[in-house]
Image (tube, helix red, strand yellow):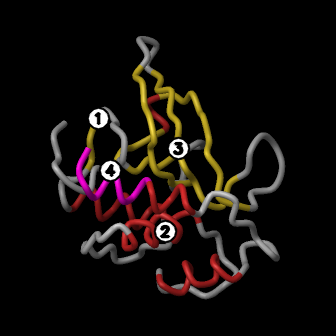
Amino acid sequence: MTTFEIKLLAAAAAEIGVHEHEPNAGPKIDAWLHAAGVESPNPWCAAFVFAMCKKAGWKGRVEHPASCDGWLTWAKANGKLVARPRIGDLVVYNWDGGAQDHIGIVTSARAMSSGRFTLATIEGNTNIGHGESDGVYRRARTIEAAKVKFIRLYAVTA
């Protein structure tokens, strides 16, 4: 792992347990949204990722950092998409084939022979189990490869 990836994981892990005070709002959430250029309340998974990247020292610039689609557009334009994830990559989820739905930070990943990935992540604006998305949590997901894209901010190797 790069120094950046270590710092990114540490920054994200330090925020586990942050919760909304109102739907899509709260002191830290409002700050993350503001830093990503949008007002509160708003969906904030991408703003969380942006804030953690900046806290870890990333100097990049995403045109719409509070948007999952913004991250994916930036990654495509800058050659940052990779086929197989590793620790410290970003994962962008698309559950229904429309706009990108969610983004998180990969803490472990395993490709399965069935065309799926088993991922452990830290995500903002999510939940554990079922219910309303309301905080920063560690998540474990098994998901079809066709429903995710992976962004590697540094040291791109496919």
Q: Is residue 22 left or right of residue 117?
A: right
Could you tell me which residue is drawn at 68 percent across and 54 percent down? 126
Q: Which residue is mark 3?
A: 121
Q: CA distance from mark 4 to mark 3?
A: 14 Å
Closer to the camera: disc 4 or disc 3?
3
Circle number at residue 151: 4
Q: CA distance from mark 2 to mark 3?
A: 18 Å
Closer to the camera: disc 2 or disc 3?
3
Could you tell me which residue is drawn at 46 percent across and 62 percent down? 11
Q: Check whether the beta carbons of the residues at disc 4 and disc 1 lie within 8 A of each other.
A: no
Residue 133: image location, x then y, percent: 74, 57
Q: Which residue is mark 2?
A: 67
Q: CA distance from mark 4 to mark 1?
A: 9 Å
Figure quadrant of residue 41: bottom right
Q: Which residues are magenta?
A: 1-9
* Nearest to N terminus: mark 2 or mark 4: 2
Residue 66 on the magenta span: no
* Nearest to N terminus: mark 4 or mark 1: 1
Using the image, determine if residue 152 lies above or below residue 70: above
Q: CA distance from mark 1 to mark 3?
A: 17 Å
Name the residue type under label 1: Ala
Circle number at residue 83: 1
Closer to the camera: disc 2 or disc 4?
4
Figure quadrant of residue 139: top right
Give the quarter of the figure containing the N terminus.
top left
Circle number at residue 106: none
Label 2, secondary structure: give it. loop
Label 1, secondary structure: give it. loop
Q: CA distance from mark 2 to mark 1?
A: 21 Å
